[in-house]
Image: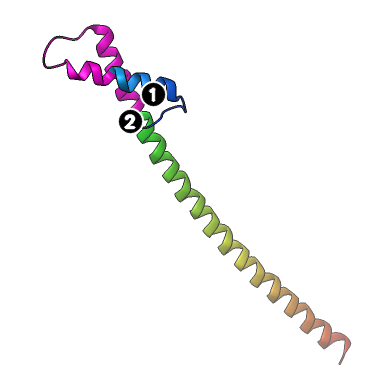
Amino acid sequence: MGAIVFDNYVFDSWLNKKSDEILSKVDKSTISTEEMLTLILKAQTNHFHHMDVEFREEFKTIDNRFETLNSKIEDKFKWQIGIIVTLFTGIYLKLFLT
C-alpha cells in the first residue's frame, strides 16, 4: 500500500487494490489499455507523494535558513542600537555634565 495522496482514502484504497490486481496478472496475460492507465495513475500518485515529501523538507530547510538569518540580523541590530545609545549617552554626559 502506498502513501495517501490528496487526502482521499477512498480513491487511494481503490487505486491500491486495482493496481495490485493488475500487477498480479501482468506476467500471466496481457493487460488492457485501461489497466495500463491505472498503473500509470498509480505511478504518478507515488511520484506526487515523493515530491510532496521532498518539497516539504526543502521548505523546512528554507524556513530554518530564514530564521537563522533573521536571528543574525536582530542580533546585529541590537548591537547597533546599544552602540548608538552608548555613544549618545557619552556625548550627553560630555556636553552637559562637564
Q: Mark 2 sits on what residue?
A: 2
Q: Quadrant of the C terminus?
A: bottom right
Q: Earlier in the sequence, mark 2 or mark 1?
A: 2
| Secondary structure category for the residue under label 1 | helix
Farthest residue, direction bottom: 98
Q: Quadrant of the N terminus?
A: top left
Name the residue: 43% across, 21% down: 10
Disc assigned to residue 86: none
Name the residue: 38% across, 40% down: 54
**Residue 89 occupies which quadrant of the picture?**
bottom right
Name the residue: 49% across, 54% down: 65
Magenta stretch: dominant secondary structure = helix
**Above or below: residue 53 compared with residue 64:** above
**Above or below: residue 49 compared with residue 30:** below
**Left or right side of 2 for 8:** right
**Above or below: residue 45 compared with residue 55:** above
Whether 97 is among the magenta residues is no
| Residues at circles 2 and 1 in contact by the CB criterion of under 8 Å | yes
* Stretch of the chain drawn in magenta: 19-46
Q: Amino acid at mark 2?
A: Gly
Q: Mark 1 sits on what residue?
A: 12
**Image location (x, y in percent) of residue 60:** 47, 48
Q: Tag 1: Cα neighbours inside 10 Å, few (<14), some, or many (≥20)?
A: some
Q: Tag 2: Cα neighbours inside 10 Å, few (<14), some, or many (≥20)?
A: few
Whether 35 is among the magenta residues is yes
**Image location (x, y in percent) of residue 33:** 25, 7
Name the residue: 81% across, 88% down: 94
**Above or below: residue 76 compared with residue 65:** below
| Secondary structure category for the residue under label 2 | loop
Comparing 46 with 90, the one in front is 46
